[in-house]
Image (tube, rainbow, N blue to C red):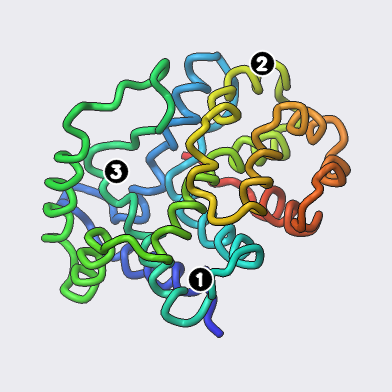
Amino acid sequence: METIKAKTDVILKELSKVKLAQDKLDIVSEFKCIPRTGKSVRIDKCGLKLPKRSLYDHIISLAEQAAIFAKYTDFELNKNNCLKLAQLICFHDVVEIMIGDVPNFSDDFFKVPDNREKQEEVANQQISEFLPSKIQKEFLETINQKPSETTKFFNMVDKIDPIIGVWRYIFLFKTQIDIEKFLNAMSDFFTNPTVKDYCTNNEIVNLVKFLQNKENAQGYFKKGADVFKRYKGRFSIDDFKYLLEKEKMNFI
């Protein structure tokens, strides 16, 4: 069966042929130039000497993460669901090429414009005009679709990704970071109460609670994968390591 990642790769390949203006890069190259603002503003404000994760990394990471989360939920990775997920993964942040990335739960670092929803609506319509007919149809259907089990599952994966990203930084830069300073800078990712609201079952709620525990993150810094033995749910150590350690992070 074709995987979410395989379908995501196919769509990204199509998007790599599309420019949103004559003097612009193609869409995928644009993804690679845009930082994830939630991490970026904290890295800057707190003086962390770390590279900034790209929007492209967020997109390709969601495909990997979705495959893991599906193992611990009732969401079925059939052919249709894989396609719909891949479309959500690839299309949901295209708008940020035009109007930038706005992080959630970042009031002290970033002010969300009051008209953000309208900006997105206008930008998405403008983006659609540059897309070939087949991609245009899929893009508009995806961004305008009604809530469903697929969108619910996608939103869960999308909202959990930022805290996973914090742990990936710890893994990749263990020898370079002051862990106390880093955890203080990333504190909002540990205290954001809305992430649990997107979880589709108690297993994922428990996972989020584990990842949002600073003591666990500090234990990961000190002891590596041994810290996962503290987890009392069904998530395996191998799946923890897959989420946090398998892929190198893509930076701008």
- Return the x and y of residue 8 as percentages of the image width and height: 44, 68
Q: Position of residue 140 (x, y in %)?
A: 20, 64
Instruction: Out of 113 and 17, give the one closest to the viewer.
Output: 113
Could you tell me the amino acid type at mark 3? Glu
Q: Is residue 163 above or below residue 57?
A: above
Asked if residue 232 lies left or right of residue 149, the reply is right
Residue 96, numbered label: 3
Q: Earlier in the sequence, mark 2 or mark 1?
A: 1
Q: Please name the residue shown 54% across and 46% down the image.
A: 161
Q: Amino acid at mark 2?
A: Lys
Q: Residues within 10 Å of mark 2 (few under 14, many from 20)?
A: few
What is the secondary structure assignment of the residue under circle 2?
helix
Q: Earlier in the sequence, mark 1 or mark 3?
A: 1
Is residue 6 shown above or below 187? below
Residue 148 picture quarter:
bottom left
Question: Distance from label 1 to label 3 (Cα)?
Answer: 22 Å
Amino acid of disc 1: Ile
Please report whichever mark, 2 or 3, sits nearer to the chain's N-terminal start: 3
Q: Secondary structure at mark 1?
A: helix
In which quadrant of the rendered view does residue 222 lie?
top right
Question: Is 202 on the left or on the right of 26, as rendered?
Answer: right
**What's the mark number on residue 148?**
none
Residue visible at 32% across and 58% down? 91
Q: Give the labeled residue for mark 2.
A: 181
Q: Which residue is mark 1?
A: 4
Compared with 186, 33 (above or below) is: below
Which residue is farthest bottom?
Answer: 1
Q: Quadrant of the N terminus?
A: bottom right
Image height of 128 relative to 224, above or below: below
Q: Say if mark 1 contacts mark 3, CB within 8 Å.
A: no
Residue at image location 43% in from the left, 58% down from the top: 152
Residue 191 percent location from the top left of the image: 57, 27
